[in-house]
Amino acid sequence: MKRLLKALIFSNVLVAAGAGALTLGSGHLWGTPAGELAGLGALVFCATLAVYSLDRWVEGRGEDRLAGSVRHVWLQGHRRTMSALIGVGLIGAGLSLWWVRLETVLALIPPGMVSVGYSLPVLVWRSARLKDVPGFKTPATALVWAAVTCGLPLVESGAAVSPQVAAWLVGERTLFIYALTLPFDVRDLQSDRLGGVLTLAGRLGEARCFDIAQVAASVVVLSALLRGLCGVAFGQWATALASLAALGLLLAGKRRFAARRPPGELYYAGGLDGLILVQALLLLLG
C-alpha cells in the first residue's frame, strides 16, 4: 500500500487526475455535463502527466538533485517509469485532441508553451528555463492552472458567460492554486537556492510565505461569498469550502515549520494537491 501511494504521488498521476477532474468540475459550472467535456478532461490529464513528468525527468540544476529527499530517491530509481509516463501522456494528449474544439486547442497553446518552457531551457538569457526567472515560478504555475482548468472548459462549452464573470472566476482559481502552491516553495527553499532559483519563499522566508498563502485563500473565500450576494453563484460553496480547508492546512503547515518539524510529502501531495481533487468533486456534486 505504501509503495502504491508513493507511486501515485511521485509519478504525478495524482496531480494530473486533479487537473483533469477540476477541468470537468469547472465545466459543470457552466451547465455542461461531464460527459460532453470528457475529451477535454482527458487532454488536460494527459498533458499534465506529460509536463510534470518531463519536469521531474529533466536533469536540471541543484533543485532537481537534492540528495536525501524521498522524492529524489524514488525518481532516481524510476527514471524508466517517468520516461514511459511522458510518452503515455503525449500520446494520450494527441489522441484527445480529436474530441476537442479547434478554438479550445488554440487557447491551449499559450499555457502549453509556458508549461514546456518551465522545465526546458527556452530563454536566450543564460539558456534559462522560465522557472529560473526570479519570482516567476509560483505565479506562472497558478496562472497556467487557472487558464487550463477554468478558462478552457468555458471555451469548450461555449457557454454564454460575460467576460467580467469569466475573469472573476479565473481570478479566484488563480488565487486558490497560488495558495496551494506557495508551500511547495517553502518545501523546496534550500534546493531552489542550490539551483539558483529565486522564489518568494527565498526572499521573505517560511512564515511570511505561509501568511501570503493564507491571505490568498481567505480572499477566495470572501470572493466566493460576495459572488453569491451579487447573483453570480457559480460553484460558490464548493470554492469557499475548499479554500477554508486550504486555510486549515496552511495554518498547520506554518506551525510545523515554526516548530522546526517540517511536514512530510504526504502533507503536500496528499493534502495540498488532494484539495484540488476535493474542490473538483464538490463542483461536480454541486
Image (cartoon, rainbow, N blue to C red):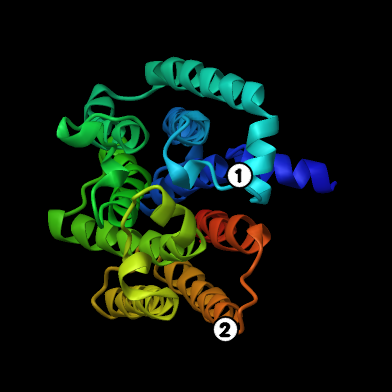
* Nearest to the observer: residue 4 or residue 157: 4
* Nearest to the observer: residue 71 or residue 149: 71
* Nearest to the observer: residue 264 or residue 154: 264
First of labels 2, 1 by sequence position: 1
The residue labelled by disc 1 is: 14
Residue 25, label in figure: none
Label 2: state its secondary structure.
helix
Q: Give the residue drawn at x 49%, y 42%.
A: 64
Image coordinates of residue 173 in percent, x first then y, are 34, 59
Q: CA distance from mark 2 to mark 1?
A: 26 Å
Label 1: state its secondary structure.
helix
Image coordinates of residue 236 in percent, x first then y, are 39, 69
Tag nearer the camera, 2 or 1: 2
Residue, far right: 1
Q: Give the residue drawn at x 46%, y 47%.
A: 63
Q: Is residue 148 above or below residue 47?
A: below
The residue labelled by disc 2 is: 255
Mark 1: amino acid: Leu
* Number of other residues with Cα within 10 Å of mark 2, as a class: few under 14, some 14 to 19, many 20 or more: some
Q: Is residue 261 above or below residue 184?
A: below
Q: Give the residue drawn at x 29%, y 45%.
A: 132
